[in-house]
Structures are given as C-alpha cells and as structure tokens.
Image (cartoon, rainbow, N blue to C red):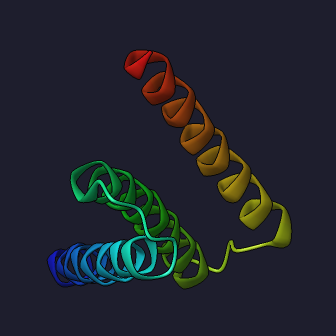
Amino acid sequence: IAGIALFFLTFGFGLVGLLATANIAYRVAVLHRPVIVREARIAFRQAILLSIAACMLLFFASQDVLYSWVVLLVFVGFGGAEYLSHVFDRHSRT
C-alpha cells in the first residue's frame, strides 16, 4: 500500500511540474501575456487540478472501475471547480 501511495504521490508531483511548466511557457511565449506571476498562479492551479484528475483516473483504472461515465463525472467535476475558481479570482480582482 505504501508503494502504491508513493507512486501516485510522485506521479502527481511530476505531472504538476510538467503541466505547470508547459502551461506557463505557452501563456508567455504564444499568448504574449505580460504578467508572469498571475499566469503562473493560473497555470499551477490548472496543473494541480489536471494532475489530481489524472491520478484519480489512473487509480480507478487500477481498480477496474474506470468507465466512461466515471471519466465524464471526473472532468465535469474538475471543470466546475476550475470555473468556480476562475469566477472567484475574477471577482476578487474587481
């Protein structure tokens, strides 16, 4: 059990780092966003949500309970969480 927990923990942290770095590079290089601190905060939030979703789906697959409706529920749930955090972030800036 400890080995599986450590696997998911290191996989999650590695995925957060990879996704956050790629997202920040995309936002700065392609979208030409000037404020790097705000973009980094958004990128890390999205990376954390995506890596949690990926770890959950990988865990469900290892337990043989990964169905299409489970994937849909996970992405709808995390999409809703991203939408709410975006709304609260935009509301706090105004």
* Residue appearing at x 38%, y 52% in the figure: 42
* Nearer-the-camera pick, 70 or 81: 81
Number of residue marks:
0
The percent coordinates of residue 66 (x first, y second) are 70, 74
Looking at the image, which is closer to me, 35 or 4? 35
Residue 10 image point, x, y percent:
19, 81
Instruction: Name the residue rendered at 29%, 51% in the picture.
Output: 41
Q: In which quarter of the image is the C terminus?
A: top left
Identify the residue at image location x=50%, y=73%. 54
Q: Residue at x 49, y 17 (%)?
A: 91
Q: Where is residue 82 in the image (x, y as percent from the top left)?
A: 55, 44
Q: In this view, does 3 lie to the left or right of 29?
A: left
- State which quarter of the image contains the N terminus: bottom left
Residue 47: quadrant of the picture: bottom left
**At which x and y percent is residue 23?**
41, 74
Relative to 77, residue 72 above or below: below
